[in-house]
Image (tube, rainbow, N blue to C red):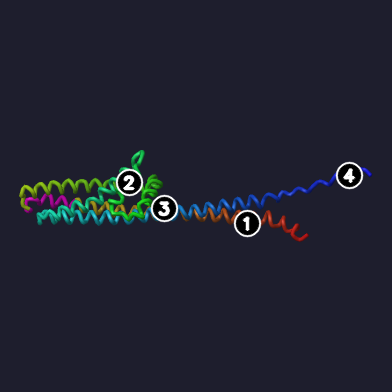
Amino acid sequence: MPAHDPPPMPLQPEAGRPTWLLVLLGLCIVALVALMHLQAAAFDGLRAFVRAEGLWAKAQKDAVLYLTRFVHSRDDSDYAAFLHATTVSLGDRDARTTLLSDSPDLARARQGLLEGQNHPEDIDSMVWFFQNFQWHEAMQRAIAIWTQGDEKMQELMALGEDIRQAVRLGVPAASLGAQLQRIDTLNQELLLLENSLSHVLGEAARGLRRALTVLSLGLLLVLGLAMAWGWRRWVPAAAPSIGR
């Protein structure tokens, strides 16, 4: 009997689709998990900076209070309290300048944030957030305001040293009216900067929430489309073989 060639095998264009569908779904799930992690880390860092701004503002007000009191009391403990309050600004300033440098010393930046009385568990989040979001427009505005605040605090510290020298020389409080007026002026200027910084940080939080929400919805949409595509293209092709 003549040999017969075996019948050609039918093409199965659908065979590879389940694999690609699973790969696509897996990538979408991994991306969603990564986005959730990014969102949590970003909000944790931003929350820490909002709290740091409050600590900075409280320390600034304490510095003004103790320096004003020192003018009248001439008590060294008031001046010591003034210096202690300024360590918050000095620590935060050191962290800011370090993180903005070309090769930041992260250990020094962390130490500066600790001196700013930030919670130790927030330090790494703050460093990560600063390094990864300093390019953002809102963060750049916040850094600019932060810089201005540090400059004003430097003026207050220099004024404090002048007042201390005057007190040592026995200059009466009544003759330090100009210095007291300057303290009040700096306090008002710092208050405006603090309000501006709070506003900018609030804008940054809202903007970050919107951006991450859009990304999350986009990934969910891709995931849904991938599932719909797989259902339409693979399940109908697999149904006849299941019924046989």
Q: Which element carries disc 1, helix, strand or loop?
A: helix
> Tag 4 or tag 1, which sits nearer the N-term?
4
| Kind of residue at disc 4 | His
> Tag 1 or tag 2, which sits nearer the N-term?
2
In the rendered image, residue 141, in percent from the top left (x then y), is placed at: 34, 47
| Kind of residue at disc 3 | Ala
Can you identify the residue that label 2 sits on? 109
User: Which residues lie in the magenta part?
Assistant: 173-185
Question: Does the residue at mark 4 contact the one at mark 2 (Cβ under 8 Å)?
Answer: no
Q: Which mark is residue 4?
A: 4
Q: CA distance from mark 1 to mark 4?
A: 44 Å
Q: Which element carries disc 4, helix, strand or loop?
A: loop
Q: Which mark is residue 228?
A: 1
In the image, which is nearer the foreground, mark 3 or mark 2?
2
Can you identify the residue that label 3 sits on? 42
Question: Is residue 150 among what the camera can see?
Answer: yes
In the image, which is nearer the foreground, mark 2 or mark 1?
2
